[in-house]
Each structure stands twice: as structure tokens, then as C-alpha cells.
Amino acid sequence: MLLLFSSLSFSYFYRTKLLKALIMEATHNLLESAKTNTLFAGVDTDSLFDIIYEDIYERNIKSGEMVFEESTREGVLFLIVKGRVQIQKHTAFQEELTLAVLHQGDFFGELEVLDGKPRSARAIALDDSVLLVIPKAVLEIMIANSHAITLNLLKTLSTRLRSIDLTFVREHERNTEQMNKQLGQLQHLIEAAKILNSSLDLDQLLTLNLETALRLINCDRGTLYLIDEAKKELWSKVLKASEIIEIRLPMGIGIAGHVAETGEIYNNPDVYNDPKFDVLIDKKTGYRTKSMLCVPVKDRTGKIIGVFQLLNKVGGVFSVQDEQFVQALSTHIAIAITNAQVAQQMVQSERLAAVGKMAATIVHDIKNPLTTMRLNAEVLKRKLGDENLSKQAEVIISQVDRFVSMAQEILDFTRGVSHLNIQETDFADIITGLIEFVRRDFEKKNITIVDKIDFRGTLKADSEKLLRVFYNIAGNAADAMTKGGTLSVNAFRKESSLVVEFADTGIGMPAEVKDKIFEPFMTYGKKVGTGLGMAITKKIVEDHKGRIEVDSTLGKGTTIRILLPL
């Protein structure tokens, strides 16, 4: 029994001794690796390590793992045997500020050991790292045994404090620069707001907005698109060969169309890498688009009313600050555009009200004498034996009816109401009646009418209102041919529609006029008229479930095309 006990005791003693030897060997190897650490520069490490080797230990840290957190206490110094460690600090603005990146041969954590205060920063392993951990008591022994240790600590502290000072100076300079830039941008926004609120003219606003953005963002080109909800298009005006022209893009097509549809900010340093960008545009214009910033313009309800597209930032690419600034600018732009649109609507409403009041006066005050005139003309027509005089009386009756009808149509338009007397109508009667009615007046103006009526059938329509439509279009064509010309009137069936075309050889219209021709009070090249004729024409055509189209080339002529269902 005693022999067994002695055997067990010997085995335990042997294993303990072996384990201790292994630990000593590992510690010795670790210390050997740490000899090159800056803490031990000029130090007799062999004699020092004989004193401390039992009280230091190794710590293995994975990449991304925290070594210690800010404001903690641990009372140990770390020597980097292998790997890298980043020292970070959170600023008052919750930003991560990197104070240092330490490598193999560096040490860290000395401040908390020396002054006993909580850690002032945090340490994170950038790689899988091996650290030698020296407790505070051991460091004090090391300092007591080696003046070089003290000197190395002071040198490193001095270097790091100077580096931290420089870091904070640079951070202060960066913050000051950023603050000055933000103050400058705020100043620019105030200046821009003054400019944008200086006009209620929408066309002028588009130009002012774009010029302001190009100047403040410092980019080469740009376009401010507005959304046409009725046509599902983006539209804008650009300067081309000293002429302002209107451009239109379908919603959802291209980068601007995508931003208009999604409401997402688009910032790309090289748009040629984006399949949504149409490189053919650059090939046609000879311009090379590089960087692009597209920002949606939203009104106060968050509804997208347009898109700001800026191209080629001068000296670089568009930054996040540029995005934020254009967003802020677009808020002011949206307010200015909305105000301009509301002002235009108010002006239009007031003008419509004035015209409506005038039309109501005509209908009310002049209708009675016109009715008397019409009755007398009918009496003359019946009693006159002369056929030519009877025809003249017929013309008087027709003109009185047309005048009253025109006044009533204007009144109805201003009130937003419409009345159709739909009947099965012989189209040839309407169109030939129009041609015969205007032919004599056109001949006086040296205008030739060429008609090709290939449709000889009926349609369901209000014949009086259709005649008004055709007369209005023919009258505008005559006004456009001040030096004479030709008006071609064509009518034919196309699938389930009747197509009626009026093509003149007049002065034509620029694109911006063509796109607004059906707006109330829009006139071009005329000194007289209410500007409601084409608006009423479009309303009558649409009341008949039809549509009206315009093709025009400046200096060559205009074609008005009406499609009516059969």
C-alpha cells in the first residue's frame, strides 16, 4: 500500500514538474520574441526576464476582436508579438476616430497602468494577434530594475501624445473646414432661395434654377426636368443653336426617367458603366458624359414633381455633400415651381372668369337683338322671290347662329361644362360646307384649298360643334399664311377611325409653342383672338372620344390631325 502511494506521489510530482517546464519554455520563447519590442530598447533583457517570466502571460486575439473597451480598467500593459492593433476613440459626434495602428514590436495600454485612470480609447485587433500581457506590478518591478524601461515609456508617450495632438488638430481643421463649407452652402441656399422667389414665370424659373445649381455645385452641364402627369413624360427646355427648345422623355426610361419613377438619388462617377445610360446621345452631340448626379424634386407632400440632372463635376466626382446640397436646393426649387404653377393657374382662372363674364354678357345682352335679326332674315328668305337674295338671307341666319354658338361655347368652356347634340351625321355635308364657306375668304388672301375627301359616310357627332372645330383650324391656318399658300384638307378611314387632316404651308411653330397650343390663352403669330380657340377645339374632339395631333416645322407649315371613332 505504501509502495502504491509512493508511486502515485512520484507520478504526480513528475507531471507537475513537466508541465511547469513546458510553461517556462513557452514563456521563455514568448519573451525571446518580445525582445525586439520598443519597450526593451537598450535593456538587459536576459537578467530582467529571469525576474519577471513567471508573472507574465500570453493572450491570443482573433481579427476584429476587442482587446479592451474605452472607460474600462484592467491594470495590464500589452506588447504586440504578432499582428496589428487599432486604437480608436468615439468623438462627441459619434464618429470613430483612429488614433493609431500599432504593429509587431509596439506596446499599448500604458496610460491606464501608469495613472490608474480608465482607458481613454479602445483597442481592436486588425489581424489574428499574439499579445504579451504584463500586469502593473510586474511593470513597476521592470521600471525599478531598468532606467531604460522608464526612458522608453517616456519616449513612446511623447511620440504618441504628439501624434494624437496632430490627429486632433487635423480633425479640428477638418471639422472647421466642413463647418465653413456647410455655412457657405447655407449662404448659397439663402441666395438661391432669393433668386428662385424672384420670378413666377415657369420658363424663367427653369433657367434660373439650372444656372444656380451649375454655379453652386460647380459642374459642367445640367437639366431640370418637370413631370407631365397627363402624358407620363419628363419635359424641360434647353438652349440649342441660340434657340430654346423643349425636350421630352418617357417616364421610367433612362437615368432621369428611372429617378422620376423610383424617387432614388443617383450618383455615378462613370455613367458609361450603367446600361440605363444611352451613349448614343453623347455620340450625336460629341459631348462626353462622365459623372452624373440625379436628384428627385419633391413638393411639400413628398410627391415627385421633377428631376435635377447634373453632369461632370469639375475637378472630380459628385460627393455625398453635393447630394445633400442638391436635395436641400431642390426643396426650394419645388416651392418656387409650385408657387409659379399656382400663380399661373390663378391668372388663368381669373382670365377664364373674365372671358366667361364677357361671354355671358354677349349671350344675355346680344342674344335678343340677334334673335330679332335672325327672325327678320327668315322672313326675308321666305318672301323674297330672288334666289340670290334668299341665299344671302341664309348666310345671315347661319352667321347669327354661329356667333351665338361661339359665345355659348366660350361660356361653357369657362364653366367647365359641355353639351353635345349627338346624331348620325353625314360627314361630307360638314366638310364640304366648311370648304365652300371659307373658300371665298381664302381666295381674297391668295390661299388655295386642295381637298381630298376619301370618306363618304356617316358618324355619330354633333355636326355644329364639329363644324366649329374645322372652322377654327382652317382659320388658324389662314392666319399662318399671311403671304398666301395652300391648305390641304384630307379625310379618310383608318381602321375604326375617321382621320381628318388640315395641312398648311404657313410659318409653322417652334417646339415649345406646339406643345402648348391647346392650353387656354395660348396664341402664336396672331394679334387678335382670345387664345381659347384651340383649347375649345381639343375639348370638343375629346368630348367626341377622339384625339387631336399636331405636326409642325418652323418655316414650313403645320398639320393638324383629328381622329374620330366610327
Image (cartoon, grey):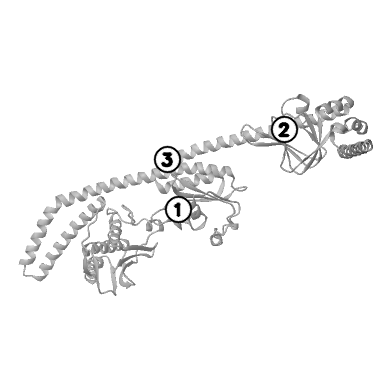
Alpha carbon separation for disc pair 1 and 2: 51 Å
Mark 1 against mark 2, which lies toward the viewer? 2
Residue type (three-letter) at the residue carrying disc 2: Leu
Question: Is residue 37 at all visible to an observer of this figure?
Answer: yes
| Residue closest to the eye, 544 or 442 | 544
| Residue closest to the eye, 269 or 395 | 269
Decide: marks 3, 2 in contact (CB < 8 A)? no
Residue 288 in percent (x, y) is at: 58, 57
Does dot 1 land on a helix, a strand or a loop?
strand
Reading the image, the residue beneath label 1 is 236
Residue 6 in percent (x, y) is at: 93, 36
N-term-proximal mark, 3 vs 1: 3
Q: Which mark, residue 198?
A: 3
Does dot 3 land on a helix, a strand or a loop?
loop
Residue type (three-letter) at the residue carrying disc 1: Ser
Counting other residues with Cα less than 10 Å from the Cα at mark 3, is it few (<14), some (14-19), or many (20 or more)?
A: few
Alpha carbon separation for disc pair 3 and 1: 20 Å
Reading the image, the residue beneath label 2 is 166
- Image position of 503 with respect to 156: above or below: below
Does dot 2 land on a helix, a strand or a loop?
helix
Counting other residues with Cα less than 10 Å from the Cα at mark 1, is it few (<14), some (14-19), or many (20 or more)?
A: many
Q: Classify the position of the C terminus by image quarter.
A: bottom left
Alpha carbon separation for disc pair 3 and 2: 47 Å
